[in-house]
Image (cartoon, rainbow, N blue to C red):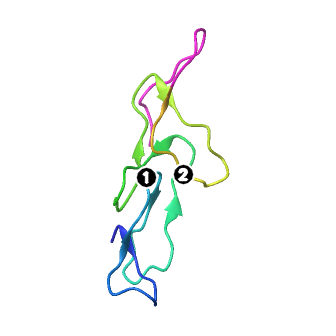
């Protein structure tokens, strides 16, 4: 997992940062959902750290989280 296969290659490609693959035989990588980020070649996305967020709601994936602006916050009480 963390790789995707293409029929024209002899090997599988790594998923790009902000995307993941947790299935065997994947043909595409999935973008990390809002509030999570992924580093290259991951099998899952991690939650953003306290005080940081990623608002992506289009599934394009995040490879970094953004620091909360003044007057706003984020806690790590995620389920």
User: Considering the image in quadrants, where does the C terminus appear?
Assistant: top left
Residue lying at the far right of the rendered structure:
58
Give me the disc on residue 17. Answer: 1
Is residue 72 shown in magenta? Answer: yes
Image point (33%, 87%), residue name: 10
Query: For numbered disc 1, what is the local secondary structure?
Result: loop
- The image quadrant that residue 72 belongs to is top right
Residue 47 horizontal/vertical position (percent): 42, 41
Specify which label sits upstream in the sequence, 1 or 2. Answer: 1
Location of residue 28 with respect to 33 vertically, above or below: below
Residue lying at the far top of the rendered structure:
71
Type of secondary structure dominating the magenta stretch: loop
Image point (41%, 64%), residue name: 15
**Are dots 1 and 2 in contact, CB under 8 Å?**
yes
Residue sitting nearer the eye, 10 or 75: 10
Image point (43%, 52%), residue name: 17
Q: On the picture, is 31 further left or further right than 9?
A: right
Q: Which residues are magenta?
A: 67-79
Residue 22 horizontal/vertical position (percent): 39, 69
Give me the disc on residue 61. Answer: 2
Spatial separation of the CA atoms under disc 1 and disc 2:
8 Å
Query: How many numbered callouts?
Result: 2
Mark 1 or 2, closer to the camera: 1
Query: For numbered disc 2, what is the local secondary structure?
Result: loop
């Amino acid at each position: 997992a963390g790789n995707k296969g293409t029929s024209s290659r002899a090997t599988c490609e790594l998923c790009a940062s902000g995307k993941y693959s947790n299935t065997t035989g994947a043909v595409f990588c999935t973008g990390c959902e809002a509030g999570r980020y992924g580093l290259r070649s991951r099998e899952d996305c991690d939650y953003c750290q306290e005080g940081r967020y990623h608002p992506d709601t289009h599934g394009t994936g995040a490879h970094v989280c953004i620091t909360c602006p003044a007057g706003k916050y984020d806690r790590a009480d995620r389920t």
